[in-house]
Image (cartoon, rainbow, N blue to C red):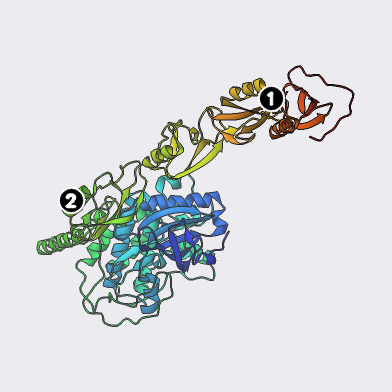
Amino acid sequence: MTTADSLVGATLDGRYFVESRIAGGGMATVYVAHDQRLGRRVALKVMHASLAADPQFVRRFINEAHSVAKLSHPNVVQVFDQGTDQGHVYLAMEYIEGRTLRDLLDGRGRLAPRDALQLLAPVLAALGAAHRAGMVHRDVKPENVLLTPDGRVKVADFGLARATEGANQGMTSTGALMGTAGYLAPEQITDSTADARSDVYAAGILLYELLTGSQPYQGDSPIAVAYQHVNDDVPAPSAKVGGVPPEVDALVVAATRHDPAERPADAGGFLARLLEVLGPMPETGPNMPLTYATAAMGHDSPGGSGGSGGNQTLVVDIDPADLQPREGPPARRTRNYPMILVGAVVAAALLAFGWWMLMGRYAEVPELVGMSEDQALGALRDSGLKMKVSDDRRYSDDADDGEIAAADPGVGASILPNEIVTVTLSKGPQNVPMPDVVGESAGDARKTLEDAGITDIKEKKEESFDQPSGTVLSTDPPAEEEADREGTVTLSVAAGFEAPKVVGMKEGDARSALEDSKLKVDVVQESSDDVAKGQVMKQDPKAGGKVDSGDTVTITVSTGPEQVKIPDIRGMKVGAAKKKLEDLGFKVKVNRVIGDRVGEFNPKGEAKKGAEVEIWTSPFGGRDGGRGGNRGNDDDD
């Protein structure tokens, strides 16, 4: 397995090219990567190898992806994908160019009360969305609040988030402190339990730090800090710095009470109280500047001074639902009628402004999956959005070939008008019924499979006595079973069989052997001095040659030695008779008795070519001339 640092330059799942390392934490390392499929930069959060080997941590990590992917909120860092590749368990998330709130605090120090409340509001809006979805962040701190160059606020790293029901089922080990000591609620420390009110406590600590420039408790170790959270009351910010109004002190005190029941029920309730305080708060000086040096999240950022930044303020994204507390409104002081009227007008204006900042100016991505390109384009135009078609395609069981298989951002996401929604077209379902191509030629079978979307086709030759060469005998997978269009289909193709050996057999036996192999037989006869009459001298194709059922094998059968008819040479002059026999391939032996004509010869009829023919002379020749007296043989004419 590669080490974490060596991931730079690697590609995960054939999709995410890792460009650089930007941050590290207790559970994972974060990298900048290029999504080669959709052509965008993403943040890859890769679990440490030691934790990736622990099934419980892997389960928690995967649940994180499933939980956060359900959130669609402008102030939540979006999770795009989750996967495992060669032991690396990772999340692919929205990549944020900008700073963390920690960078801002380190560079600027404490904020003015109005700036602090304006910055905390979108954090509470994001947490409120999570709480309504049944999730708890568990690790709210400045390092997990990202500030974009255009002034947006994003809450990141729901790495410890769990659905409330999941937490009740023991997903967190007893005694394990899930979070950062400086922001842990007392119940997280004593009982290892957390709910929405634990996030409210952490947000209260965060507000304290924004107002004072430091956390309320300091210690030599996390345990020392945790001890103070359990045993001490969080002091009012005004006890440390001046200029903090009592109503802002009250926000911190209410959010950080020891008893969770005395805190706002969730981030939505806390946000409602915050907006009540923020509405009538006067401008005390230049607002927090929106523009500052851009740094990739997780990198050390250069410290900045808190100089003038004009009248620009941070974007405060607020959902109307974020303003609905789960508990009764706090006690209000008796006011005279004009002040109540003014307050109502201000509150209504704040509510309207907050709704417009979060919802009124945003467009919601409609459901596109299953639509044609034209239908999707029309639906997006109706929503005030633009469409881009990805160059890549994907398999989908929910969309036919050419229809929309996925959209990014997904259905229900709230984005600014005229922003682009990238759609991915479907290649149809990945698994298709295997076509029946048995009995087809290999070429025809390939075309049938390719028409069904199957392109990885292999052939395996197999001996067959029944089918011609090139015929498909069987397939893997078999016909009608599910075939993966990304998988391999193997065709078993007939390759004929070896011709049996019949040379040396008698003609009848050879014919039977060939016909039993479903071969046709053609017989040619040929004389031979060496092979007995009736035996097979040779065959074509030769033994072992490839043949198909129904092919013809030609066998050559010996007729024995070649026989030549011996002419009747009686009465011929010896010289002429001898020449005639020699021209026919015979050897001639002359026995001279008397005279110069052939009186007798032997053998008669037929003889093997090259055989010896013996002749006897006679003075008369004729068909009954005798052999004459007892004179010796003479080979001369």
The location of residue 409, given as percent across then percent down, is 30, 55
Evaluate whether residue 264 shows in this view.
Answer: no
Q: Secondary structure at mark 2?
A: helix
Question: On screen, 388 above or below 307?
Answer: above
Residue 326, image x, y percentages? 29, 50
- Residue at left 36%, top 41%? 451
In the rendered structure, which disc, 2 or 1, sits on the residue that comes first in sequence?
2
Give me the C-alpha separation between circle 2 and circle 1: 107 Å
Depth check, front residue: 275 or 317: 317
Quarter that holds the N terminus: bottom right
Q: Secondary structure at mark 1?
A: loop
Cβ atoms under marks 2 and 1 closer than 8 Å: no
Which residue type does callout 1 highlight?
Answer: Pro
Instruction: Give the labeled residue for mark 1.
Output: 567
Amino acid type, callout 2: Gly
| Residue at the extreme top of the image, as rendered | 624
| Residue 516 in the figure: left or right of residue 72 | right
Which of these two is toward me, 23 or 373?
A: 373
- 254 vs 138, left or right, is left
The reply to whether residue 283 is visible in this rendering is yes
Residue 612 versus residue 178 in the image, above or below: above
Q: Nearer the viewer, residue 207 or 300?
A: 300
Left or right: residue 216 versus residue 76 is right
Q: How many badges with numbers are in the image?
A: 2
627 w.r.t. 85: above or below = above
Q: Nearer the viewer, residue 218 or 511?
A: 511
Residue sitting at x 55%, y 38%: 461
Residue 28, percent from left and from top: 49, 61
Residue 552 quadrant: top right
Q: Which mark is residue 378?
A: 2
